[in-house]
Image (cartoon, rainbow, N blue to C red):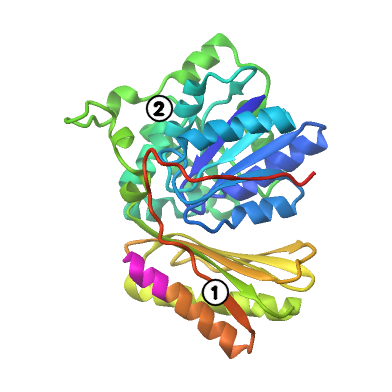
Amino acid sequence: MKILVVGGFLGSGKTSTIIRLGTEFSKAGQKVAIIVNEIGEVGIDGDVISKYGLDMTELTSGCICCSLKVNMKVTLTLLEKDYKPDIVLIEPTGIAFPQLIKNEINLMDLKNTTIQPLVTLIDGSRFKQLMKEAKNFAMRQIIDAEILCINKIDLIEKIRVPIIEASVQQLNPTAKVILLSASLEDEHWHDFVKLAMGDEPTQQEMRELKTTSADTKEIDETTGAPVQESLDSIEASGIASYATEYMINDRITADLAQNVAKDIMDAIKSKVMELSPEFVGHIKLFIESESNTFKTNLTAYDQDVTTEVIDTVTGDMPRLKVLSAVSSIDHEKLVHIVNDTISEKLNDNMINFRHNKPHGHEHNHGHPKPINLINNN
């Protein structure tokens, strides 16, 4: 069983990359399992991945690298026992330190398991903003990576690509740096797959991949440990986050669902920008209609809201879920913006709904919450 951790800051393209990898490997006859970790008690990406027909395990209610260590081992053990996957893809929340996740898996001493090089995705289209709004956190993810993928190169001016590439390589001279667009079928994608999941690397390549810039990491004077190991990653990120779910009491048309989703996202963006004019992060909204599921995304103040349409069969009661993680904003203000905007827009469109209010988020260490195993076979 091969295990690949694909990390990266919020909105870097992890879910799209995971879906594409999982689909590609499945078509090649390999059994793929996916572990998704999201902030809060409401998962979104897990629903999207499941709708593509891939098996997944969703870990919510915290950061996988500190509050869910025990459950990660339980999850991997159960997957191996009950599903026997060839490949396990792990998508941590964008405000986790992926290196800690890989370290924990290494310490589990799982049998018949190969842990692949740690992958970190970087949204090249907003690299400058990211280094401004969440520099220390983003740098820690970059420094820890063994494979660095500058993603969304199709959205970057060609003249800027080598500049970003050089900047990233300077931050982590020992990492393999790859240019990538998860939406394109090109040599960059094939190089990425080969490096991340291909044949066993040579001894020299293993030495290069295992070499990290640990000697250059800032050391905590109190604990003597690298700084990231002594921090709660969610607190360290400086990102306010909130996730919640609404049940829609009536079936709604695809056109109405799409319009409502766009209205909600545009309004949330406008309100957030009043408090954090140059925010980065990720706001995701997932809404089901009678015939389709719409997933909308927003990753920064100067980006447009994008919509992805997934053909699917909706349950008896459609759902609307939202996950918001935004820089430089107070948590309580973010909660009010999200809830007030959703209620307002649903009422404006005379849509009956029920708010499934999440429990208060507690980020406890050493007291992991239970996980849900979802098997779509």
Depth order, front residue of 339/203: 339
- At 58% from the left and 25% from the top, the residue drawn is 116
Above-or-below relation of 120 to 47:
above
Quadrant of res 242: bottom left
Sequence-wise, the earlier of marks 1 and 2 is: 2
Specify whether residue 175 is in view.
Answer: no
Residue 78 sits inside the magenta stretch: no
Residue 173: which disc? Answer: 2
Q: Nearer the viewer, mark 1 or mark 2?
A: 1
Q: Which residue is mark 1?
A: 355
Instruction: Name the secondary structure under disc 1.
Output: strand
- Residue closest to the eye, 112 or 177: 112
Q: Which quarter of the rendered picture does the N terminus lie within?
A: top right
Say which amino acid is labelled 1. His
Q: Where does the image place residue 220, in percent across and percent down from the top left?
A: 21, 32
Q: Position of residue 3 (x, y in %)?
A: 61, 29
Q: How many marks?
A: 2
Query: In the figure, residue 26 lies in which quadrant?
Result: top right
Q: Residue at x 42, y 32 (%)?
A: 100
Let me know if residue 274 appears in the view: yes
- The amino acid type found where label 2 is placed reads Pro
Of residue 1 and residue 265, the one placed in the foreground of this image is 1
Magenta stretch prevailing secondary structure: helix
For the record, the magenta segment spans 330-336
Q: Which mark is residue 255?
A: none
Q: Is residue 136 left or right of residue 257?
A: left
Q: Residues within 10 Å of mark 2 (few under 14, many from 20)?
A: some
Q: Circle 2 — which element?
A: loop
Residue 84 located left or right of residue 74 = right
User: Residue 232's quadrant in the figure?
Assistant: top left
Instruction: Give the crowd class for mark 1: few <14, some 14-19, many >=20 residues within 10 Å.
Output: some
